[in-house]
Image (cartoon, helix red, strand yellow):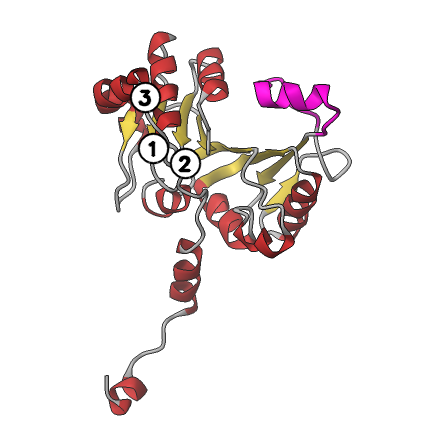
């Protein structure tokens, strides 16, 4: 491009700059793993009924589930055991899971089918892109983020998914009154989450003490978490509601 063309090129809007920066944030590092036969079978056979592909236009959640219902979206469900448990316990609620670990997606789908669950759909893709491109604004009742990568080294804190730009995207996807529920077993990350959420516009802390909340009954204890409790490790839950 010539110097004249550069001078005449329009400046990118602030919105375009922020969107480009946000899209560089990844919800999790892509982790490959060997599929078991059970997981591979689930991915092959059950994807048409349970899987959702990343697309550049918003899904109609009513069409996806064949009904209007409260919708919970979980980011990074791991092997999916707790997500399946929650979906089974609340058949009146729609659940969407996002995970980049392919064996985890396969395991989640296999467990869900074996449990006879029909109110769960899953993405195998990066959560930031799914939220930006495929999830309608004002459509979610709850967003769950349980035990995300803590990036515990100080120089890696910028890689943590809970940042102001990210929670602003979530705010747009939540309904008014909808909640963002986080949990972590790293106290430093809990403090980081609290600091970010207190600075984020349009949210209010549901904690009576304006910090953390007791683990709600609807969040199942994982094997990892139970082991941590036995070892004396702490777990911190935060729930912030969208006000505006």
Look at the image and give the residue range highlighted in magenta.
Answer: 214-234
Label 2, label 1: how many angstroms apart (C-alpha)?
17 Å
Q: Is residue 213 left or right of residue 106?
A: right
Percent x, y for residue 58? 29, 41
Mark 1, secondary structure of its residue = strand
Which residue position is annotated with label 1? 123
Percent x, y for residue 148? 54, 37
Q: Quadrant of residue 221?
A: top right
Label 3, label 2: how many angstroms apart (C-alpha)?
13 Å
For the N terminus, the quadrant is bottom left
Is the magenta region chiefly helix, strand or loop?
loop
Residue 18 in the image: above or below residue 125: below
Label 1, label 3: how many angstroms apart (C-alpha)?
19 Å
Residue 125 colored in magenta in the image: no
Mark 3, secondary structure of its residue = loop
Near mark 3 (Cα within 10 A), the count class, few <14, some 14-19 or many ≥20, is few
Percent x, y for residue 231? 72, 23
């Amino acid at each position: 491009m010539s110097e004249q063309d550069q001078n005449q090129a329009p400046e990118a809007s602030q919105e375009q700059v922020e969107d480009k920066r946000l899209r560089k944030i990844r919800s999790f590092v892509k982790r490959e793993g060997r599929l078991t036969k059970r997981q591979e079978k689930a991915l092959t056979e059950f994807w048409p009924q349970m899987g959702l592909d990343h697309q550049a236009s918003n899904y109609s959640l009513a069409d996806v589930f064949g009904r209007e219902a409260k919708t919970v979206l979980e980011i990074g469900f791991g092997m999916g055991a707790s997500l399946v448990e929650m979906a089974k316990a609340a058949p009146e609620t729609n659940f969407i899971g996002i995970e980049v670990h392919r064996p985890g997606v396969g395991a989640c789908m296999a467990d869900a089918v074996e449990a006879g669950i029909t109110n769960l759909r899953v993405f195998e893709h990066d959560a930031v892109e799914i939220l930006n491109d495929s999830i309608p604004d004002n459509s979610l009742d709850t967003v769950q983020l349980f035990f995300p990568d803590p990036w515990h080294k100080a120089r890696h804190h910028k890689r943590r998914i809970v940042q102001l730009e990210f929670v602003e995207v979530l705010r747009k996807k939540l309904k008014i009154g909808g909640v963002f529920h986080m949990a972590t077993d790293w106290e430093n990350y809990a403090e980081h989450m609290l600091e970010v959420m207190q600075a984020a516009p349009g949210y209010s802390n549901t904690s009576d003490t304006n910090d953390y909340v007791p683990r709600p009954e609807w969040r199942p204890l994982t094997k990892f978490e139970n082991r941590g409790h036995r070892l004396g490790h702490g777990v911190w839950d935060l729930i912030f509601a969208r006000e505006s």
